[in-house]
Amino acid sequence: MSTQPEETHLTNAQLDQLSINSIRVLAMDAVQKANIGHPGMPMGAATMAYVLWSQFVRHNPKNPHWSDRDRFVLSPGHGSMLLYGLLYLSGYDLSLEDLKQFRQWESRTPGHPEFGATHGVETTTGPLGQGFANGVGMAMAAKHLAARFNRKGHAIVDHTVFGIVSDGDLMEGISHEAASLAAHLKLSNLVYLYDDNHITIDGSIALSFTEDVLQRFHAYGWHTQRVVDGNDTQAIAQAISAARAHQRGPALIAVRTHIGYGSPHKQDTAEAHGAPLGQEEVALTKRALGWPTLEPFSVPSSVLDHCRKAVGKGQALEQEWTQRFERYRNAYPALAEAYEAALRKRLPAGWSQHLPAFGPADKPMATRKASGLVLNAVAPALPALIGGSADLAESNNTYLNCSGDFTASDYAQRNIRFGVREHAMGAILNGMALHGGVIPFGGTFLVFSDYVRPAIRLAAMMKQHVIFVFTHDSIGLGEDGPTHQPVEQVMSLRLIPHLVTLRPADPEETSAAWRVALEHRGGPVALVLTRQNVPHLPRSGVSAFDGVPKGGYILAGSADPEILLIGTGSEVQWALQAQRQLALEGVAARAVSMPSWELFEAQSQQYRDEVLPPGVWKRLSVEAGATLGWERYVGARGAKIGLDRFGASAPGPLLMEKFGFSSEHVLAQARRLLGRVH
């Protein structure tokens, strides 16, 4: 058993060791008090995390939002007590009482790090691999902003994205995609430490993971190193220094750690991964570490004094940067103003004047094409807008003609070629939004929103301004068949809290939908667009720019309706045609366009009742997708026209007709509700 020296005679090396062990002890105690959690990872990774934070990460604990701070991503979020311990010891707004409330109701120390819940947490992690890709997105945003705003002698964007990643992160497919793209883009501002502890929940990593990780990352184009002893502070520091000095791409350092380090009976076992050590083992571990007391959550004052030097250091770093920025402002006032506006998420004055208008005189057009026209009309006025698609720029109409490709040779450009990497694309977009200074968007086919879904969910959880562009939105895409024809996807997106899903009916609604997407705050937006042409719909009274932000609006029809025909997307045309025919038959019908359930639900009850009068029970919904959920608006006695089966391979117009998406079928169903069937 090691002996802890007297605090009054500590060398720097002894202070370092005491600080490292403080991280371990806090992790053990917090998990033990909560009686649930993951103590092993923080115990094993404590040394490399401490070296990284004490010697390399440029941050200001008193201002976690300083724009030029280094970012730190703990991708294996189950090891959250590692991050909480670092934040507490460094002097962030996180108290010892907060650590004692680990995993409790409304705690600032939830089981996995949650963006917005705890100062200093840069992203919500837990689903393995997502944090890895978030960091890539942060590094891309930093490269872009540096290329756009830095000038010779004025580097106002000059920071690094650091992270700790785990075996689990590297097994998940998303990390393969993100690592490949990061190397292709030569993101030299990205440094990851790999917690190589050889243990997963099931046991030894050899059960399922025998690849040579460093060879894999070397093949991608990463700078790779290995540290054989995860407690060798000097070797870890040297490796990080070498990684930072490497300017030809991202860096990965594999550090051989020991899960549950210090535990006499549970070190290097799966038992240390996801369960408390137990009171007896905690006591034995503290003795093995030479800890001076068995009292829970006890941190020596010398450790706090030592670690909280980060406060003064961080304030000095930010002050120096502030002075640098003022010199920059004096030299480049317009750029300085633009930089601050981008960070504050302010859209330039008058940008919406560039939104194109469409009308009935225009030829029918796919909403994906209309989306591309809108995007290119506003992009020159919105320099923060940056994005691309998963190898589908031409199909998604997401290419910005006013810019070139974002590449290792020109990070200032705004078209990102994500390649066939939908999983990584979504999480990278999240990382870019979290970094700040950009409005990221990304496109793919709607059916592949399933690949992006974990990232969409996290974007919604973190309430990040990310715009997801999904085209080929129904069986209307045609001959590619059921593998590419979405059925359940729109309805499944509506299940995600804080996500606004918009399915515009025509080009005018598409333009209005883009305005909503760009102005929306409080979460991501999904634009759901057609491959096939749709007509420009005539409107009586309410314009799309007034109606779409409300989620649903009266498109045409009676002020005192007998029946309501509610549609979304390309199917609204059939509802409108049926309404017109019913009017000729003397029926007071109303056609309602409802591009967004979420926006409609956000309106007052009075407005919703005006659009969908509660006394009118004869209601019919029309949407080329799963019908489950439409009972919210049509009730138990209403009817639903939808698709509760997979599609087929055939021309789109024929599929629409065969599956009942036509004015004739809508009219027939409406007549049944009205009791007019003969």
Image (cartoon, rainbow, N blue to C red):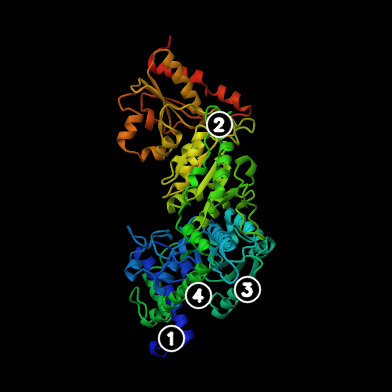
Mark 2 is surrounded, within 10 Å at the Cα level, by few (under 14), some (14 to 19) or many (20 or more) other residues, namely some
Crowding around mark 1 (Cα neighbors within 10 Å: few <14, some 14 to 19, many 20+) is few
Q: Earlier in the sequence, mark 4 or mark 1?
A: 1
Q: Tell me the quarter of the picture where residue 116 sits.
A: bottom left
Q: In the rendered image, which residue does mark 4 sit on?
A: 47
For the C terminus, the quadrant is top left
Q: Nearer the viewer, mark 3 or mark 4?
A: 3
Give how far apart the Cα atoms at labels 1 and 2 are.
68 Å
Question: Of the residues tagged 4 and 1, which is closer to the observer?
Answer: 4
Q: Residue at x 60, y 41 (%)?
A: 396
Q: Position of residue 4 (x, y in %)?
A: 42, 85
Task: Measure the alpha-carbon separation of dots 3 and 4.
Answer: 21 Å
Q: From mark 1 to mark 3, how far is it between C-alphas?
A: 38 Å
Task: Kindly identify the amino acid type of the residue bearing the numbered disc 2.
Answer: Phe
Would you name the residue on which mark 2 appears? 646
Q: Do the numbered discs 1 and 3 sit on residues whose CB atoms are within 8 Å?
A: no
Residue under label 1, please give it: 3
Q: CA distance from mark 3 to mark 2?
A: 54 Å
Q: Secondary structure at mark 4?
A: helix
Residue 245, numbered circle = 3
Q: CA distance from mark 2 to mark 4?
A: 53 Å
Considering only order in the chain, which callout, 2 or 1, is on the residue closer to the N terminus?
1
Amino acid at dot 4: Thr
